[in-house]
Image (cartoon, rainbow, N blue to C red):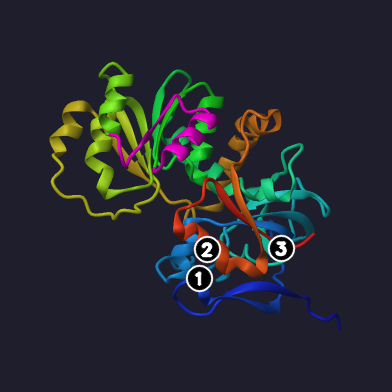
Amino acid sequence: MTEPQTMRFIDRGGDGGPDVLRVAHGPAPTPGDGQALIRVQAAGINRPDIMQRKGLYPPPPDASPILGLEVAGEIIALGAHETGYAVGDRVCALVNGGGYAEQCVAPLGQCLPWPSGFDAVGAAALPETYFTVWANLFRIGRLSAGETVLIHGGTSGIGSTAIQLARGLGAIPYATAGTDEKCETCMTLGAAAAFNYRTEDFVARIRELTNGRGVDAVLDMVGAAYFDRNLDSLADDGKLLIVAVQSGDVVDGVRLSKLMRRRLTVTGSTMRPRSAAFKAEIASALLDHAWPLLESGACKPLIHAVFPLAQAADAHALMESGAHSGKIVLTAGP
């Protein structure tokens, strides 16, 4: 009988701070129908990982309890009914869990080839932010060339991706960030202007730069604290696209007549609970529209720091500090 394969992974030893994360050993997963088993070389860190570690974001019932929503590596096995990929292919993938490990299972529809010229770290920094930005800003928000968008958290993984994709596809991005240095980074990424939210009124600056019109869309991860100001930043018929609620999710004192009078749209979404079919649709759109920008160099992931798998706790502490600009990535192997 063949001995079951084992692997290293990061175990969450209960809810709590970064110190609950520890290296553990256990059985490697096996791919089911329409799935690939990936030998993980790198895995991205995202805020949902922080929430899950704290016990605030439980994984879906059919997902691995191991943290990690995006990986890059080599396919080492395929389940039944596979199409489009072969053992040995290098892919990055949006996964439903299990990324902080040496091996991870991914639905084939959520896999994408490494863009030409990319290494594992760069490829691992793509899936979560690119799937999220495309689904919200372009699929729901229908942002098009010539339109304007305000992007909060411009140097976060989501923000830096949104700035580059918007610029690369002909839209005009504005951004907010928490320091002057981070605002300069936003400008380097392609923002038409960037505002330090600690010292500037972004609503007034948007109105000034758009001749009082406002922007066509706002991509927001702040939530309640910015809700009313986001509405004031929008042009008539504009869209507020909410992808996170870091400041809370309860809004008081907002006049609904403002939405009605100005024909505003407010929408929100989360990626993890969406169906495999929906995520496969987003992957196909990314391959057609975003991957050429990555391969040409018009877009590239902003990488702040890389940690070995065993230092996942340090990586989480860095993310929670807010001192980073761009992605934080774990490396799991050669």
Residue type at numbered disc 2? His
Sequence-first disc among 3 and 1: 1
Q: Bin the neighbour count of mark 2 within 10 Å (Cα to Cα): few under 14, some 14-19, many 20 and up.
A: many
Sequence-first disc among 2 and 1: 1
**SS at circle 3:** loop
Residue type at numbered disc 1? Pro
**SS at circle 1:** helix
Q: Bin the neighbour count of mark 1 within 10 Å (Cα to Cα): few under 14, some 14-19, many 20 and up.
A: many
Whether residues under marks 2 and 1 lie with C-beta atoms below 8 angstroms apart, the answer is: yes
Residue at the spot of label 1 = 18
Residue type at numbered disc 3? Ala
Per the model, the C-alpha gap separating discs 3 and 1 is 18 Å
Residue at the spot of label 3 = 332
Left or right: residue 47 compared with residue 90: left
Q: Bin the neighbour count of mark 3 within 10 Å (Cα to Cα): few under 14, some 14-19, many 20 and up.
A: many
Instruction: Return the x and y of residue 43 as percentages of the image width and height.
Output: 64, 57
Sequence-first disc among 3 and 2: 2
Residue occupying the point 43% across, 29% down = 142
Per the model, the C-alpha gap separating discs 2 and 1 is 6 Å
**SS at circle 2:** helix
Q: Which mark is residue 316?
A: 2
Picture quadrant where residue 5 is located: bottom right
Instruction: Return the x and y of residue 159 as percentages of the image width and height.
Output: 47, 40
Picture quadrant where residue 9 is located: bottom right
Q: Is residue 138 visible?
A: yes
Left or right: residue 106 compared with residue 161: right
Residue numbers of the magenta segment: 178-200
